[in-house]
Amino acid sequence: MSGFFYSVALQWKLDIRSKSLLVTCYVVPLLFFLLMGGIFTSVMPEMKQTLIQSMIVMSVSMGAFIGLPPSLIETYGSEIKKVYKANGAPAASGLVTMFLSAFIHLTLMSVVILALSPLLFGAVLPDCLPHFFSALAFYIAASLCVGSILGLAVKNQGKLTMIAQLVFLPSIMLSGILFPADLLPDVLKHTGRVLPAFRGFQLMLDGGFLPERLWYFILVFCAAFIVCGILLKKQDAA
Amino acid sequence: MNDAIQIHALKKSYGSHKVLKGLDICIEAGEIFALLGVNGAGKTTALECIEGLRSYDSGTITVNGTMGIQLQSASLPAHIRPMEAIKLFAKWKQAKADCAMLDALNIREIEKKQYMQLSTGQKRRLHLALALTGNPDIVFLDEPTAGIDVEGRLSLHDQIRTLRKQGKTIVLASHDMAEVEALCDRIAILKDGKIAFCGTALELTDHVSKKYVIRVKTQQGNQILETDHIEDALLSLLTAFRQKGIGVLDLRVDRGTLEQHFVELAGRAEE
């Protein structure tokens, strides 16, 4: 177990040293938050009710879909995975440590948004913080599950950039964080509901943390567990 | 001597391409054993099957002891520092990093650098240190000195000899015949997925070439002679020179280099 805990702590440090992850998990989301937070709350003052949840959805989507998968490709698409295996680290250790490290980074980013939003833009804090943080944990984990599948399934960075955008952009546009999802045509509305961003946004809203909404997240966790297991086994046999 | 590794009838294919067609090798404990072959002969595949990094189609592999593995093409996360990598894998192996080994490989000199800032030689040293972490009984070295300058190469050779003195079994794959000749007790040559030869360098010479080449430099010029019977040839040659009153300035006898014998046996498949 000490190998596992050291791996997570080390990965967290490596993520801080890696400029790309710093940009996707902190710099861009913070800039977006500072810029759009001001615009949203000026143009639509009612956005103050949901600003924290909206900005968190944007940040988590960016970190999970644009930030995590390239790190996974760097390990699983290269000789690094063989070195890990040759030196006694289980095949899944890279995935699990990167997942947990990214989870910590995205939680920290979310806390920064939560703390700054009321101060900078007069945003309304969630009614029930334990429910909010529970919803946040479910949402971040589900988004990272999707990011993990992307990082293991796609072998090439160029292709990954394109596919990650195909998940990231609909997550932002169709989740209801920029405008109410009900205004969308039916096809887009239903497409948006498949993505963790929509579900996470609903779950984090006041009164939104309902047990019947958790089935979606449990389904995503189970599917990701099975798919990642298959992908890792496939890589191991190659 | 006990066998550290026994391989019997090992077969491995990639699709329809048969890479290993029934490999049989016994590697004795405490020896430095080289696995040679031209590019694509299946050296790395064979090593990775023994190391447990690659599945194989049929055959048996028995490894008696713990393994330390230095891969041919190895990499680590760009931002990791050498001591962090050593500590990480020491923890996974439930072992402690050996300070004497780290000093011998000069790892402490580079401990502040990140992996992406290391030179090829420094990376090789780090990967050797990772392989040796946990004090394994058997050490696999795949092209350990590729891309390293002469000084670094000699230093690594010293390290390998030290490991042998410590009683470790070393399995080496290399294209550098001088390195193999200088370090190894026995060699195996892989050709067409099978072992074409297994024995000492001297046995290889006997196997490939019976002829001795005598190069003589006299006051009257140079002469080259080939013979199967060195004693008789030398005796008659020197007697003839003496009788004719010809002074011998230099005389050399050789049976070709390991590289020549390797090329003759393994063929020039890569050209």
Image: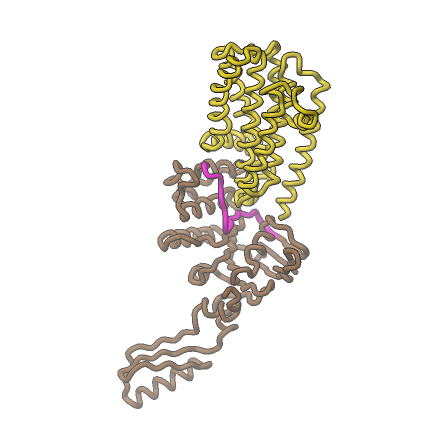
Chain colours: A yellow, B brown
- Residue B263 at x, y percent in the picture: 49, 68
Q: Residue furthest bottom?
A: B243
How many marks can you see?
0
Residue B219 lies, with reference to residue B183, above or below; the image says below
Which residue: 42% across, 42% down? Answer: B102
Which residue: 48% across, 11% down? Answer: A119
Residue B36 lies, with reference to residue B112, above or below; the image says below
- Residue A104 at x, y percent in the picture: 54, 25
Q: Which quarter shows the N terminus of chain A?
A: top right
Magenta region, mostly helix, strand or loop? loop
Residue B106 lies, with reference to residue A107, above or below; the image says below
Which residue: 53% across, 62% down? Answer: B37
Closest to the observer: A85 or B33?
A: A85
Query: Is B73 included in the stretch rendered in magenta?
Result: yes
- Residue B194 at x, y percent in the picture: 60, 64
- Residue B35 at x, y percent in the picture: 53, 59
Residue A4, by quadrant, is: top right
The answer to whether residue A48 of the structure is visible from this angle is yes
The answer to whether residue B104 of the structure is visible from this angle is no
Residue B226 lies, with reference to residue A106, above or below; the image says below
Which portion, as a residue range, is magenta?
Answer: B63-80
Q: Is residue B209 left or right of residue B193?
A: left
Query: Is A231 included in the stretch rendered in magenta?
Result: no
Closest to the observer: A228 or A200?
A: A200
